[in-house]
Image (spheres, rainbow, N blue to C red):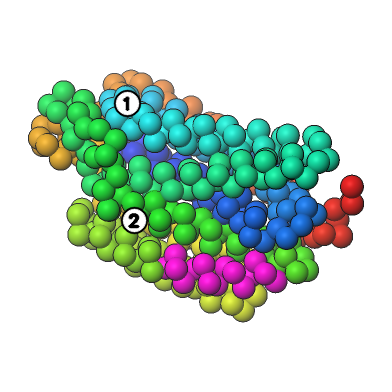
Amino acid sequence: MELTTIWFLLVAVLFTGYFILEGFDFGVGMLLPVLGRDDRERRVLINTIGPVWDGNEVWLITAGGAMFAAFPEWYATLFSGFYLPLLLILLALIARGVAFEYRHKRPEASWKRRWDAAIFWGSLLPAILWGVAFANILRGVPLDADHEYVGGLLDLLHPYALLGGVTTAALFLTHGAVFIALKTTGEVRDRAGALAVKLGLGAAVAAVAFLTWTLSIRSSAAAVVLAVGAALALLGGLAAARARREGWAFTGTAVAIALAVATLFAALFPNVLPSTLDPAGTLTATNAASTPYTLKIMTWVAVVFTPIVLAYQGWTYWVFRKRIGVVNIPQH
């Protein structure tokens, strides 16, 4: 297997891990005003992701770094053409991170409401915009023969991209509700489990529509198989949620997101950013890649450090594996 293919797969794996882990983070943030009926319940929800949310964001940093080093042409064209959406994602993530740190600094209800709003919007905007971005990556954007983006913002906001944003937001909401049910006790757990089933039905409809549309634009045998697997995993997760088997439900939604992301990358390959204007402007895994020597050095670095990072993050989740509830939150 060529190194360009290996690094395409590694970038796909990194984004898959990011969407699985940050996906439930976003879901919890979006559900904060829905499932948190008072301050103690909202603190329970925040505490479910408190020890892990910042570690989950490292997957995005690593994916961006891998793209920059392995496929500099892809990185440069993507980040210049998608500048405004990616800037909005960055600002939302900053506001969300600051909110987690500052919410508890003062006791006033108005102070906490403002930071709760920052958590909500800082979760909702990336959840939508990531779907919009990846839908455009797969469909293609106007690139000239020099691989330069020559479109505008409105070129990124077509119906297919908007459906992609709705789909990712719906999947993350469902994933977050299942995670809350898995990590909490009492009434919060009960409400989250019931809501996960309702949200999941809407997410299933959106996901099937989006993946069907995706396969009509670009397809491969592997992409079709992965799309069917994603749908089955989501339905299995919803069935487990309905039976209050939260561990299996979370596994189902995680696998569904993983297979959905894999579907997009399988349908995209060997391209990394198609051009809707001129086939000569299309970026592929070959013409967008770094030199073979660079890819070789990066491969050895990845082989050494990736297992260490995965082991550390797995240990973090194991340490903070227990459920929490209102009884664990002191009154202020």
Q: Residue at x 12, y 36 (%)?
A: 277
Q: Position of residue 214 (x, y in %)?
A: 26, 56
Which quadrant is the N terminus positioned in? top left
Q: Is residue 21 left or right of residue 32?
A: left
Q: Residue at x 29, y 35 (%)?
A: 153
Q: Amino acid at mark 2?
A: Leu
Q: Position of residue 64 (x, y in %)?
A: 43, 31
The answer to which of 100 and 244 lies nearer the viewer is 100
Q: Which residues are magenta?
A: 190-204
Q: Amino acid at mark 1?
A: Ser
Which structural element holds mark 1?
helix
What's the mark number on residue 80? 1
Q: Position of residue 99 (x, y in %)?
A: 67, 37
Residue 136 appears in view: yes
Q: Is residue 306 above or below residue 232?
A: above
The answer to which of 266 and 169 lies nearer the viewer is 169
